[in-house]
Structure formats: structure tokens, C-alpha cells
């Protein structure tokens, strides 16, 4: 989900408490939006192809002494948005970039999660997160070229030919999605 869609959905449900969750766990109601990041990446994969993309990252923090705040409810979307609005006065966000959440769930180390969906239900706005994963973009390009994916035809070594990738999204857009496509 891009940043504009994420924020527009929050604005449409500003009175609802935000509950961030994955299939495995939900974040404690004691979380705090501790940082908003505009992040730009410039990388080279193991197939020697460069990639450039940007993201908006929302860092959530759950204090270790959550017992000190008994009965605290999940943050309302309007409070989350008030923080974002204050950030955007100094650091305008690019609405087209993916919205991602950096958070520790339970006993797991902090990690990046994609915002998969926002669902209003049961008087709450559920923010469904999908954990990030490691990927090999070169292997994904080989699979895509062999199956007719977006990268076109491959050379004898299995890498996309220059003509196959010219004008396509490979190497210029966002990293591969959680599916086995080479570029989305």
C-alpha cells in the first residue's frame, strides 16, 4: 500500500483506534509512533543489476515497562495523523512510496513490515502487516524470464537480455513484491 492510500484510510477512520497486527501477533496498545522516515535505497543485487526505490517508514516502539501505563488503549488514528501532519511540515512525504512499519512484535527483533491492508471492524482500524523477507532479485529475474514474467527473454546464462529489460521496470522500480515476480 502506498503512503497516500495509507494516510487517506487513516483520515477516513480518524476516530478509530489503530491496532497493528500480523498473522502471528498484535502490537501492544502501549505503542508509540517514535519516528517517521523518508528512506531512499540504491542497491546492486548479486546479478550486478542496480535498483533504486524509496519508502515511507513508520517506526513504532513499545516501552519495556508497559505495566507503568495500565489500561492504556490503542492510539486513535487522529493522534497518529496529528504526528504525521507535524512531521510533514518539516519533512514532506512522497505519497507514491510504499508505506512500511518498523516494529518489534512480541519477543521478536524489530523488523520492517509492509502495510498489507487496513480494515475497519469491531470499532477498531486493523492495520494488517506482512513481514518483509529476504529475496534474490537475480533468481527472481531468471524465474520470470523463464515463465514469461515482466523481464522478457533471457540470454544463454539465464539473465535478461539488455533488449528484454530496456523500458521495463527491472532494476529501476521497487524491490520485488512478496510474490515471485521480478519487479512490481
Image (spheres, grey):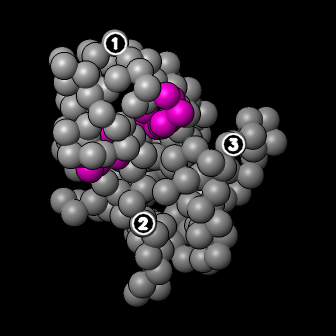
Is residue 55 placed above or below 24 in the rendered structure?
A: above
Q: Position of residue 58 (x, y in %)?
A: 51, 44
Q: Is residue 41 above or below residue 24?
A: above
Real-space Cα separation, disc 1 to disc 3, in angstroms: 30 Å
Secondary structure found at label 2:
strand
Q: Is residue 55 visible?
A: yes
Furthest-right residue in view?
Answer: 89
Viewer-nearest of discs 1 and 3: 1
Residue 33 screen position, x and y as percent: 53, 48
Task: Identify residue for label 1.
Answer: 48
Extreme bottom residue here? 122
Query: Dot 1: within a 10 Å radius of its alpha carbon, few (fewer than 14), some, or many (20 or more) residues?
Result: few
* Disc 3 + disc 2, Cβ < 8 Å: no
Q: Nearer the viewer, residue 108 or 115?
A: 115
Residue linked to disc 2: 117
Residue annotated with mark 3: 93
At 59% from the left and 62% from the top, the residue drawn is 5
What is the span of residues highlighted in magenta in the rendered image? 166-182
Viewer-proximal residue, 72 or 135?
Answer: 135
Please say if 178 is above or below 79: above
The reply to whether callout 1 and callout 3 are in contact (CB within 8 Å) is no
Q: Nearer the viewer, residue 183 or 108?
A: 183
| Real-space Cα separation, disc 3 to disc 2, in angstroms | 20 Å
| Camera sees residue 65 | no
Side of 4 where 91 appears, left or right: right
In magenta segment, residue 167 = yes
Q: Tell me what residue is drawn at x 69 percent, y 42 percent.
A: 93
Q: Earlier in the sequence, mark 1 or mark 3?
A: 1
Amino acid at each position: 500500500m502506498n503512503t497516500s492510500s495509507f494516510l487517506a484510510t487513516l483520515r477516513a477512520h480518524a476516530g478509530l483506534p489503530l491496532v497493528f497486527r500480523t498473522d502471528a501477533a498484535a502490537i501492544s496498545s502501549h505503542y508509540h509512533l517514535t519516528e517517521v522516515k523518508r528512506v531512499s535505497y540504491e542497491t546492486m543485487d548479486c546479478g550486478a543489476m542496480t535498483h533504486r526505490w524509496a519508502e515511507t517508514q513508520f517506526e513504532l516502539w513499545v516501552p519495556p515497562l508497559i505495566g507503568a501505563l495500565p489500561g492504556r488503549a490503542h492510539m486513535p488514528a487522529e493522534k497518529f495523523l496529528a504526528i504525521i501532519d507535524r512531521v510533514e511540515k518539516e519533512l514532506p512525504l512522497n505519497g507514491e512510496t510504499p508505506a512500511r512499519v518498523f516494529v518489534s512484535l512480541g519477543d521478536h527483533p524489530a523488523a520492517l513490515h509492509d502495510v498489507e491492508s487496513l480494515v475497519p471492524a469491531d470499532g477498531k482500524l486493523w492495520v494488517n502487516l506482512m513481514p518483509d523477507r529476504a529475496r534474490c532479485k537475480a533468481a527472481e529475474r531468471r524465474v520470470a524470464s523463464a515463465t514469461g514474467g515482466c523481464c522478457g527473454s533471457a540470454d544463454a546464462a539465464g539473465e535478461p537480455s539488455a533488449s528484454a529489460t530496456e523500458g521495463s521496470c527491472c532494476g529501476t522500480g521497487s524491490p520485488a513484491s512478496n510474490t515471485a515476480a521480478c519487479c512490481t
